[in-house]
Image: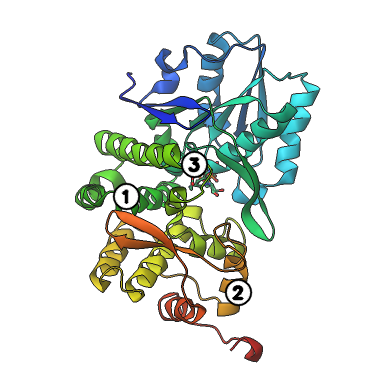
Amino acid sequence: MPITARLDVATPGHRYPILIGPGLLAEGEAWGGLPAARHAVVVSNTTVHPLHGAALEGRVAHAGYAEVHRVLLPDGEAHKDWSALQSIFDHLLSCGCDRKTVLFALGGGVVGDLAGFAAATYMRGVRFVQVPTTLLAQVDSSVGGKTGINHPLGKNMIGAFHQPVRVVIDLDTLSTLPTREYVSGLAEVIKYGPIADASFLDWIEANLGALLARDGAALAHAVRRSCEIKAAVVGADERESGLRAILNFGHTFGHAIEAALGYGAWLHGEAVASGMVLAARLSSELGLVPPAFVDRLERLLARAGLPVQAPALPFDEWMRHMRVDKKAEGGELRFVVIERIGSAALRTAPDALVQRVVERHGGAALPRPAAAA
Ligand code: NAD
Ligand code: GLY
């Protein structure tokens, strides 16, 4: 099966390809010219490795590495933590992996973020290849070099920017992905329309049925266009000094939902979907977009099967979690808002307005302690 799209990510210090196509784990085209080394390490988890590990390890062995090691992590967002990271280091050190070692991250965003952070820090940095196997990882987390782990007090709070040397996206790996996970990934696909490309939003609306049916052509287009947008944003602002923050549309609210409910209770894309509705409402309340845009986004997310109403949380709990958001500056929250469809920006908003948005549109408000009222 051929590579159907080849994109470049170009940051000030790095340039690397994203290779997209069906069946890329089953053939050699995507695997030539990898960095030479004695040791290669496939990092995956106990769910993904039995499905796709043998195919990747075959490719890696053919690529000329004398020793191909395997690290299998426990599955789940709850394991995106120090202990999983430590287990990667334990394996690397006990196998004698040197600083030329190449890591291969096979899995969703959790494995990619963990393996990437291990690669960023092992012996002060080794090279790694992203082989994403969830829709979310294929359209978002495998591209752009954000790596890291969660802290009980905040999601993705410990990490590093470390670009992969290559991203290999085998669209066929999505055939084994459970529906709920697939739909969660669609939230990040939908995100790219409002923030960067109005016509992509039109296209998603028109092709949602094909996407939900995992039609090969629709999927290939959605993944390619998403990666093009992400690559352009990362190329312009690798370290998130400004523009890159737009990729976090819906994430300030979404991360708060994930942290408040406990990592893994709501999937990342589910939390982001209802977070996008809240962020769209906020944009509308700020007078940037008409209420009709919010309804349109909500309809599309609901058609995809994503939650559009946030869980009911006391406002002080929203604020407690949102204050640790990485976009906050000097304690002041900043939200990604939609200025017009296809264009986003970072804005502050008065607490009272944020409260109105989450309480009116974020599920029934729970009674708040008197001190917070
Ligand atoms: P995930 O990695 O937990 O994968 C979801 C589930 O699907 C897991 O159970 C996994 O084992 C399973 N799975 C993966 N591929 C499969 C396949 N092909 N067949 C069957 N099962 C498969 O979750 P995710 O949604 O991929 O990623 C979410 C994570 O990504 C979050 O931690 C989030 O913070 C992070 N993220 C990072 C970035 C970034 O830029 N680094 C961007 C967005 C999200
Ligand atoms: N997913 C947000 C980013 O990569 O910046």
* Residue 313 screen position, x and y as percent: 55, 76
Q: Earlier in the sequence, mark 2 or mark 3?
A: 3
**Can you identify the residue that label 3 sits on?**
141
Q: Tell me: residue 248, above or below residue 349.
A: above
**Can you identify the residue that label 1 sits on?**
196
Q: What's the CA distance linking mark 2 and mark 3?
A: 27 Å
Q: Nearer the viewer, residue 365 or 290?
A: 290
Residue ID at (36%, 53%): 191
For the residue labelled by badge 1, is the local secondary structure a helix, a strand or a loop? helix
**Can you identify the residue that label 2 sits on?**
317
Instruction: Tell me which amino acid carries mark 3.
Output: Ser
Q: Is residue 139 visible?
A: yes
Q: Comparing marks 2 and 1, which lies closer to the viewer?
A: 1
Query: Left or right: where does residue 326 sit relative to residue 365?
Result: right
Q: Residues within 10 Å of mark 3 (few under 14, many from 20)?
A: many
For the residue labelled by badge 3, is the local secondary structure a helix, a strand or a loop? helix
- Quadrant containing the C terminus is bottom right
